[in-house]
Amino acid sequence: MPSAQVHNTVNLAALVGGLALGWTTGLVHLEPCVPFAVGFLFSTLLLSPDLDLAASVRVDARKNWGVLGALWMPFGRLVKHRGVTHTFVRGPVVLLAYLGVLLSVLAGLGWLVVQGLELKVPVVRVEGVWVGWWMTGLLTAHGLHLVLDGYRPWVWRRW
């Protein structure tokens, strides 16, 4: 299996090469490139399928979270390596669900602080099309990671 550095290098080369090829041929428009690239980079650098090792090994994705990387340690204890996170659709869903729970708890704590300090918090709106392209980038990077690990998308139990 490739190392984290190989995974990251291949993913980044595929992103740059794919966008450059699409841009020069006119197949890719600028508007979806940004959210796609952000989702792709997020998956490559922060939401790697190898976060299932976060409890026992200091994986790059956990290191990239900085001090928040410790929050992925319980996840590493909950799932086995090369289990559900190494599937093409269920893996990203489980990783995003865990991240959603973490963010909800942190947002709840943040809300209590904001209420106590009576601060004004700006509301951020995200367009649905942006989310769709972001998810496409995330799933593409996740799938490329799995293909490099030797998993094939035509094996249905890997979905």
Image (tube, rainbow, N blue to C red):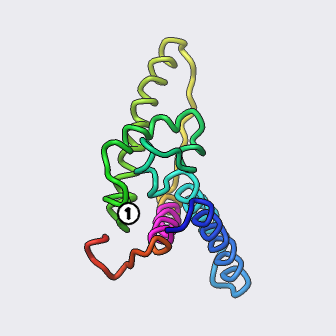
| Above or below for 108 versus 61 | above
| Image coordinates for residue 105, horizontal then vertical, percent | 40, 30
Q: Quadrant of residue 106?
A: top left
**In what element is the residue under mark 1?**
helix
Based on the picture, tell me whether residue 140 belongs to the magenta stretch. yes
The answer to whether one can see residue 118 in this image is: yes
Q: Is 73 left, or right, of 43 in this rendering?
A: left
Assess disc 1: are there few (<14), some (14-19) or many (≥20) residues with their C-alpha within 10 Å of its C-alpha. Answer: many
Residue closest to the far left: 157
Name the residue carrying label 1.
Answer: 86
Q: Is 44 left, or right, of 103 in this rendering?
A: right
| Above or below for 85 versus 62 | below
| Above or below for 16 versus 24 | above
- Quarter in which the C terminus is drawn: bottom left
| Image coordinates for residue 89, horizontal then vertical, percent | 35, 65
Which residue corresponds to the image point at 36% horizontal and 60% vertical from the top-left? 82
User: The magenta stretch spans which residues?
Assistant: 134-146
Which residue corresponds to the image point at 64% horizontal and 63% vertical from the top-left? 34
Main SS of residues in magenta: helix
Residue closest to the far bottom: 25
| Above or below for 17 versus 100 | below
The answer to whether one can see residue 31 in this image is: no
Q: Amino acid at mark 1?
A: His
| Image coordinates for residue 86, horizontal then vertical, percent | 38, 63
Which residue corresponds to the image point at 43% horizontal and 49% vertical from the top-left? 53
